[in-house]
Amino acid sequence: MSMPDFLTFAALLAALLLATPILGGYMYRVFEGERTVFSPVLRPVERAMYRIAGVDETVEQGWKGYTVSVLLLALVSILAVYAILRLQAGLPLNANSAPAMSPDLSFNTAISFVTNTNWQNYSGEVAASNLAQAGGLVVQMFVSAAMGLAVAIALVRGLVRRSASTLGNFWVDVTRGVLYILLPISIVAAVILVWQGVPQTLNAPSTITTLQGAHQTLSIGPIASQEAIKELGNNGGGFLNANSGHPFENPTGLSNFLEMFLILLAPFALTYTFGRYAGKQRQGWVLLGAMAFIFVVGAIFLMHVEANGNQLFPAGVDQALGNMEGKEVRFGSAVSGLFATITTDTSTGAVIAMHDSLTPIGGLVPLFNLILGEISPGGIGAGLYGMLVIGAILSVFIAGLMVGRTPEYLGKKVESYEMKMAMLTVLVLAVSILGFAAVATATQPGQAGPLNAGPHGFSEILYAFASQTANNGSAFAGLTGNTPFYNVLGGIAMLIGRFGMIIPILALAGSMAAKRRVAPSLGTFPTTGVIFGVLLVGVVVIVGALTFFPALALGPIVEQLLQNAGKVF
């Protein structure tokens, strides 16, 4: 890893550290209904939206009502996107003459964007019209991101409120998330991307003559607006098939830095928001520290491995530039490795390099990030509620066992019901990832998908279901996923990964909200110090390792050992 690569990483961390308290404090004010800098302009718009929708912003919902609202919005969104994709051939704004998507691909794509996954078994510039992209998929990028924010805030309210029966109003939280947070930042980011050369137009694709005299069609469209929310909302769905590796989506070093910054911005800032709600900022900083530690270790490891290149090549052939197969040549192997870590540490899925071309041990990093549940720092909203439940709740339970008393978090006892809900969120990920991967490896339609044989082919299958269950959307890129088998199973995996976590998490939030706080005692385990941070990291890593190590051993680990012996796949 060269000095410029190291400085890029250091500058990114510094920018995030500066932005976290600013955006985190702002999000707290937004969700608490306090006045912000945008209130004079957006508050009238917000009130008008409530009047049109028939929403009373002063009426809050219990966890069951909140959950029903989440599921209702998701159902309506899936049906709307599915209809657009099936009918796009006859709808306006179809400059690239995109045909109607097949039923199974429309099913997969609709679920993908509604669940914030953005798994794409199609080439955007060919298979989706401008109307489908901007009016269907991009709308869901905003809505699904706001849904994740809303659920995270509902959980936080449940943890900090005393003897309460409500968690807030889902429709109000979603509206404020879109209006005050996602839209303003996305507009600024889109303008910067247009300045850097990202197209923003409704014109038809252009045909040009190359220097060699050949003709090439350049797909253009409203790319900058989609690129901004794609990264900020941890969506990842690209307008173009090459995603952020395409110069129309990511033309310069500055645009690449901005996109990495946008991906990490909201997940890290939410830890500060949590600290504000908890009334003790150190509660948020310890979560931030745990998330950042896992992220930094993974990023440095992957950057180093990819910068060293494939050792099977003779010295000097690729060691100078690192492993450049499938990489973004403008930014190099190390920065491509950094982007791969960022996009899988969150639920983004955007790529500037093909993960299928990573070294075996390098490919282990993004795969491990996915199976951890993406909580370092995780997706927008999803990272915080995942870390609070999978990390914090389990950690205080283990700490309680150590000191021989009922575990507590933020002054509330964590009892049998809360542990059942927490374990359900852990198990649902494992059942979906390992269960669907097993089905795919044991059946003919599943075996027809991987490009490679042996452990690498298994990694392609495992990665696909890990990515879809974790609502990430990136792929090893060696799997033929546009088949009825993978479209249907993948769609189900995305639904399980999203709502199989949200429902028990909201149930846990409702239970915790109803509890009274207990006074701390000598046996209370502190949750604001380094020891708790270390325990957080340990619990997250150990749970992931114990659950998925056998599958990882059959995939990237054994592939690396075989490569060391001179055998490749």
Image (cartoon, grey):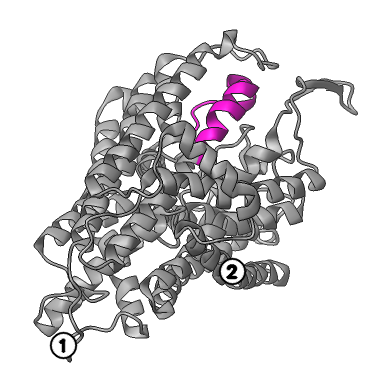
Of the image marks 1 and 2, the number of the one nearer the N terminus: 2
Q: Element at badge 1?
A: loop
Say which of marks 1 and 2 sits in front. 2
Query: Few, some or many C-alpha atoms within 10 Å of disc 1 (few <14, some 14-19, many ≥20)?
Result: few
313 left or right of 382 in image: right
Q: Magenta stretch containing residue 148, yes or no? A: no
x and y percent of residue 408 in the render?
19, 75
Q: CA distance from mark 1 to mark 2?
A: 35 Å
The rendered magenta stretch, by its main secondary structure, is classed as helix
Q: Residue at x 37, y 38 (%)?
A: 461
Q: Which residues are magenta?
A: 118-142
Query: Which residue is disc 1 drawn over?
Result: 523
Judging depth in this view, the residue of 289 and 312 nearest the camera is 289
Q: Residue at x 39, y 79 (%)?
A: 280
x and y percent of residue 170 in the render?
37, 45
3, above or below 339, in the image: below
Type of residue at label 1?
A: Gly
